[in-house]
Image: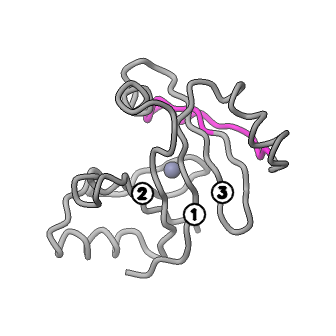
Amino acid sequence: MKILKIDHLGIAVNSIDQAKSFWSTVLGLHFEGSETVAEQKVTTAFFPVGESEVELLESTAPDGPVAKFIEKKGEGIQHIAFRVANIEEALAELKAKGVRLIDEKPRIGAGGAKIAFLHPKETGGVLVELCQRD
Ligand code: ZN
């Protein structure tokens, strides 16, 4: 598997509107806009940082994965995303190595990227996302 870079850090927040000012006004990062991914019950907001991005995540429903994360752990870093050259290949390799996956097949995330999550029990408690952008 070829990991190209850290694509983004996913940060769970109660409100993008409230959290946004720290990232844009205080740190001076450019707010690239937000997008709702209905299937994941989440609204995302992206702030490019060099070759990577900060992705704020706000749940759109009380039973969404981001809402559940905040309920358990509070606001904070929710996942780390690695960009891979070929996500199908990476998933096949991980499966062959016996790594438990949340997504056996890639699905479409924010920005039209192909994404898949590994099971946090396999990664020392870190939710790892793979993503491929063409
Ligand atoms: Zn992500």
Quick check: 112 left or right of 100?
Answer: right
Q: Which mark is residue 19?
A: none
Q: Earlier in the sequence, mark 3 or mark 2?
A: 3
Q: Are marks 1 and 2 in contact (CB under 8 Å)?
A: yes
122 in the magenta segment: no
- Three-letter amino acid code at the position of disc 3: Glu
Q: Earlier in the sequence, mark 1 or mark 2?
A: 1
Q: Secondary structure at mark 3?
A: strand
**Residue beneath disc 2:** 129
Q: Are marks 3 and 2 in contact (CB under 8 Å)?
A: no
What colouring method underlies this structural image? one colour
Q: Earlier in the sequence, mark 1 or mark 3?
A: 1
Quick check: 3 left or right of 90?
Answer: right
From the Cβ of disc 1, is ligand 1 less than 8 Å away? Answer: yes
Q: Are marks 1 and 3 in contact (CB under 8 Å)?
A: yes
**Residue beneath disc 1:** 7
Q: Position of residue 98 (x, y in %)?
A: 14, 69
Identify the residue at horizontal 85%, vertical 48% (top origin). 28
Q: Position of residue 42 (x, y in %)?
A: 51, 32
